[in-house]
Image (cartoon, rainbow, N blue to C red):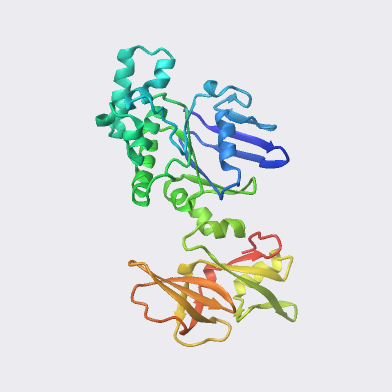
């Protein structure tokens, strides 16, 4: 198999920079997910790796070979598209076997390899059908089969699950991850769905505005985001943010003061702020699961909030709260009993608070 190395790649479309000075190393046999919103540059980068686009700057290596200007057919990669791109006039067998036919593989060998792939994907009973006779999940498996049969060094997948219904997407996440492990093929997978990224990836490359924002394991991305964008993009419900100002006394940080709240700063956090901070304007980030209700108000510890709405989800309850006109979400148990308009005292787990520089959005603590 092969590692993939992306070195200072830049791709432009006219005056628009789609990928900006991107460097990324994908390990051999790794399942790497490129995650980001629409327009972040992830699909353009994938197409550069595939050879469907050529970058203006930088190099792309597959294994030890520079493929920056190589034709797609010479890169030994297989791409699975969002639309599956099956040939409508061919049956499933011919769709899967197409690349083997082009390379003049003998019919007996083609038949054997198609059967092996079909058995692996559990689509042997579909080989005589045409694409229009397939469900979304079946078509997706056929597209995978067409990629697998080439025995490529690298799989490239561009949102292959986005056209499936929610239940089938959950099932196919597990199937794809298992398939990648069984085949031991380096896989680069593009998605805007953070749940897909968290459940499938060995590592996640978070992209925004044509730039790599952070690269790390799902745990690192979730618990140690590098900036406010990564923190807010990962997690469902998303991280809550509260703007605040640092209040000092005798030149020592004392508390965070924001609209409708005041929080005393613990000693360990004071030491970090004195060492790292270059501003007094911050944004506090807290995940919905790291908030809880306090029975009575404690000055400097609890935040007064009003319930805006209750979202029962069966296995948990999400409570929408307003704090100084800001809407926050809190995850709690199903036995939580309260109603819109009720006043609560909310406590944030201070060891779970993320402190961002409000101007740069970079993590301070």
Task: Indicate the position of residue 278 as horizontal and vertical percent values.
Answer: 74, 65
Based on the displayed image, in which of its 4 quarters is residue 4 positioned?
Answer: top right
| Residue found at x 32% / y 15% | 109
Q: Is residue 363 above or below residue 63?
A: below
Residue 364 is drawn in which quadrant? bottom right
Height in image: 292 above or below 80? below
Q: Nearer the viewer, residue 300 or 152?
A: 152
Name the spot of residue 108 as percent of width and height, x first: 30, 13
Q: Residue at x 60, y 46 (%)?
A: 39
Apparent side of residue 60 relative to residue 330 in the rendered image (left or right): right
Q: Position of residue 361 (x, y in %)?
A: 66, 60
Residue drawn at x 45%, y 79% is 293
Q: How many marks?
A: 0
Q: Is residue 52 left or right of residue 274?
A: left
Give the camera-side residue of 78 and 255.
78
On screen, 327 above or below 156?
Answer: below
Location of residue 2 with respect to 231 vertically, above or below = above
Q: Position of residue 49 (x, y in %)?
A: 57, 32
């Amino acid at each position: 198999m092969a590692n993939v190395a992306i070195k200072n790649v830049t791709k432009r479309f006219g005056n628009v920079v789609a990928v900006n000075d991107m460097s990324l190393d994908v390990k051999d046999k790794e399942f790497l997910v490129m995650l980001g919103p629409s327009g972040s540059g992830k699909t353009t980068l994938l197409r550069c790796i595939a050879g469907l686009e050529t970058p203006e700057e930088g190099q792309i290596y597959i294994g030890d070979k520079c493929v920056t200007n190589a034709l797609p057919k010479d890169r030994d990669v297989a791409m699975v598209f969002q639309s599956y791109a099956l040939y409508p006039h061919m049956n499933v067998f011919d769709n899967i076997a197409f690349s083997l036919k082009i390379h003049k593989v003998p019919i007996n060998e083609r038949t054997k390899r198609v059967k092996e792939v079909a058995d692996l994907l559990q689509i042997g009973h579909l080989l005589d059908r045409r694409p229009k006779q397939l469900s979304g999940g079946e078509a997706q498996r056929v597209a995978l089969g067409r990629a697998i049969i080439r025995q490529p060094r690298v799989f490239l997948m561009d949102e292959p699950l986005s056209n499936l219904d929610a239940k089938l997407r959950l099932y196919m996440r597990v199937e794809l991850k298992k398939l990648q492990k069984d085949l031991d093929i380096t896989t680069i997978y593009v998605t805007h769905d953070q749940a897909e990224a968290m459940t499938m990836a060995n590592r996640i490359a978070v992209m925004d505005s044509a730039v790599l924002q952070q690269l790390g394991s799902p745990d690192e991305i979730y618990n140690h985001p590098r900036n406010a964008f990564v923190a807010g993009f990962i997690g469902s419900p998303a991280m809550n943010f509260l703007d605040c100002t640092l209040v000092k006394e005798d030149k020592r940080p004392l508390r965070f003061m924001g609209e409708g709240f005041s929080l005393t700063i613990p000693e360990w956090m004071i030491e970090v702020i004195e060492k790292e901070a270059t501003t007094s304007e911050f944004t506090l980030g807290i995940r919905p699961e790291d908030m809880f209700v306090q029975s009575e108000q404690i000055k400097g510890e609890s935040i007064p909030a009003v319930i805006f709405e209750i979202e029962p989800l069966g296995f948990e309850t999400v409570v929408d709260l307003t704090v100084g006109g800001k809407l926050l979400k809190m995850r709690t148990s199903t036995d939580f009993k309260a109603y819109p308009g009720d006043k609560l005292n909310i406590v944030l787990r201070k060891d779970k608070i993320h402190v961002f520089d409000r101007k740069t959005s970079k993590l301070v603590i």
